[in-house]
Amino acid sequence: MRKTYIQIAIAGGLLSLLSMTASAQSSVTVGGIFGLGVASISGAQIGTSTYTVKSKLVTMAQDSKVPSRLVFRGTEDLGEGMTAFFLLDKGFNGDDGTDTLGGAQRETLVGLRGSFGAVTLGRQFHPLFNVRDDFDPTADSSNLMVSAAFRMNNSVMYRTPVAGGFWAKFAYGFGEVSGSDAASRAVGAYIGYENGPIAAKFGFNNLNDTTGLNSAKNTLMGASYNFGVATVFGEYGVNKGVIVGGNYVVADSTDSLLGVRVPYGPNTFAVSFIRKDDKTATNADATQLQIYYGYSLSKRTTLYSIYTKINNSATSNFTTSHAPSAPTAAQFALGARPANTELSAGIRHSF
């Protein structure tokens, strides 16, 4: 009988040890970012239309540099260097508690990674957006610069391992339009390089309209160099066509960005300048100057301020990130103009 008790005790100990090992091999974490501030927006012109944007507006505004989100991450060690993982990234508006993006998730993906690289499936950031976002030192290059769709729904992505400082990401987005494999289909990729102070990416996007007969093509190159006291950034993009609401719109433009970020103790100072050169007959050129300042109260909490100034040509209609919608073409023709100057300040906390 005593021998039986000893055997039971040993078996129980082994089961407990195996349970502890299994739990150590998988984990789920909850984190996120909450940023909120106040913005003063000006520059809008009413014109003689029904465009009702005030010439000056003071409003509570989301953190445009690092949008608020609640993030669930999970991993499981499958052994032999392979890991399964998932990500659920939910955006929210802190001022009124509503969801961002019409209730859609920022990202939802599941995948495997190992010595072969990583394969993910779901709703994911577009490789071209990765290029644009990685080399934007301030916040809102999206006011002027094209990044295709920020995200690819119904997508499969593969990221290669790093070799000699180089790696690549390839993406395919199923259009999921009945009767046509080409309709709304998206293809994208980038090649990245990082070695010491140098970083660079070159990406492209090809997005079809809902008919599958026309496609928008965008290419973008970004690079940075870290001098220690400061990091300089540059981007250059070429845009041939754009998809708006699933429909193809003629576009022919180039985007260029120059910027610098300077950290100093708890302070971070950054400036960027963007120029959009519209090569169509409309000649809707524009430039944007943006200045960012952040002060870190701790590793998790930062006070920030962002100043944005957009200079539109006589035919361009670009607006700042927190301004109301730009006037329609009909309102624009009657003299209405978008808000083009914004100063925001707030607090951002990571958890």
Image (cartoon, rainbow, N blue to C red):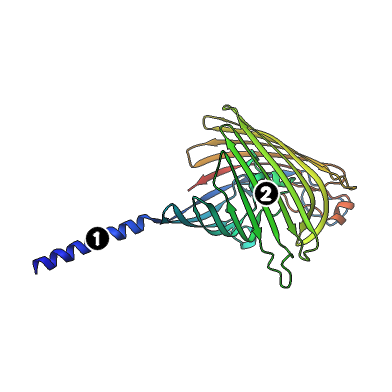
For image coordinates 56% across by 47% down, the residue present is 35
Q: Quadrant of the N terminus?
A: bottom left
Residue where numbered disc 1 is placed: 14
Q: Could you classify mark 2 by the number of other residues whose Cα lies within 10 Å: few (under 14), some (14-19), or many (20 or more)?
A: many
- Marks 2 and 1 in Cβ contact (< 8 Å): no
Q: How many numbered callouts?
A: 2
N-term mark: 2 or 1: 1
**Residue 294, horizontal then vertical, whole percent:** 58, 36
Residue where numbered disc 2 is placed: 128
State the image quarter where residue 8 is shown. bottom left
Q: Is residue 230 left or right of residue 204?
A: left
Q: Is residue 183 left or right of residue 48?
A: left
* Vertical side of 66 occupied by 268: above or below: above
Q: Mark 1 falls on what kind of element? A: helix
**Residue 315, horizontal then vertical, whole percent:** 87, 46
**Residue 94, horizontal then vertical, whole percent:** 57, 53
Q: Could you classify mark 1 by the number of other residues whose Cα lies within 10 Å: few (under 14), some (14-19), or many (20 or more)?
A: few
